[in-house]
Every structure is written in C-alpha cells, then in structure tokens.
Image: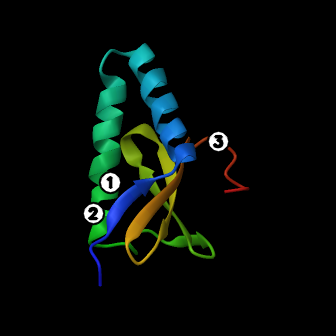
C-alpha cells in the first residue's frame, strides 16, 4: 500500500484561511494557533484514517475542539482528502 499524504481541497484551504484570518483579528497569533491545532488533529489520520466516524457515505467528520471548527474528509488509498473546514455553528446539513 502506498504511503498516504494529506490533500487539502481549495474549499478546505479557503475555510482554513478564513478561520486563520478571523482568529488573528480577534487576537494576534490566535489564527496561527488554530492552524497548529488543526494539523495536530489531522496528522494522526495518516496512521488512523478511520479515527472519526462516517457521516454520509465515505465522508467523515473530525473536530478541532479548542476552536470548535469541524472538517470533513475522505479516505483514499493514497491520501486523506480534507474537503471542508467550517465553524461548528455553521449549518452542516449539506456537508
């Protein structure tokens, strides 16, 4: 089996950037802390891809607890595809 890598979609990257910028406006450096926490949560998926439960089909949802942001991802043979990153208060019905 090939080694997996993390792949962040443009939509997820936009969510990460928006969250980082918003949090940095609230407190200098807070957005950078968010990115670090996000990576701390996502990196273990390389070894434990089924860490979070599926929410619809092959789509799984994880959470960055401290900041209450959620992310959706799909496990592929060679990648963990991060599809979206949104705040937990966002209506996630369509994700």
Q: Is residue 79 left or right of residue 11?
A: left
Q: Secondary structure at mark 1?
A: helix
Return the mark for residue 90. Answer: 3
Name the residue nearer the viewer: 61 or 14: 14
Q: Can you give x and y, in whole percent of width and height, for residue 77 in the image?
A: 41, 78
Sooner in the amino-acid sequence: mark 3 or mark 1: 1
Q: Which residue is mark 2?
A: 44
CB within 8 Å, label 1 to label 2: yes
Counting residues from the start of the chain, the first of labels 2 and 3 encountered is 2
Q: Is residue 68 visible?
A: yes
Cα distance between the residues tagged 3 and 1? 20 Å
Residue topped by disc 1: 41
Task: Give the farthest residue toward the right.
Answer: 94
Q: As displayed, is residue 71 above or below residue 69? A: below
Instruction: List the single residue furthest toward the bottom.
Output: 1
- Point 36% across, 59% down: residue: 6
């Amino acid at each position: 089996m090939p080694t997996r890598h993390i792949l962040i979609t443009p939509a997820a990257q936009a969510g990460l950037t928006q969250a980082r910028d918003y949090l940095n406006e609230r407190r200098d450096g807070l957005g950078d802390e968010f990115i670090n926490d996000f990576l701390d949560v996502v990196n273990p998926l390389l070894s434990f891809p089924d860490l979070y439960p599926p929410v619809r089909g092959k789509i799984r949802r994880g959470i960055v607890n401290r900041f209450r942001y959620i992310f959706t991802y799909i496990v592929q043979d060679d990648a963990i595809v991060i599809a979206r990153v949104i705040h937990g208060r966002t209506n996630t019905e369509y994700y």
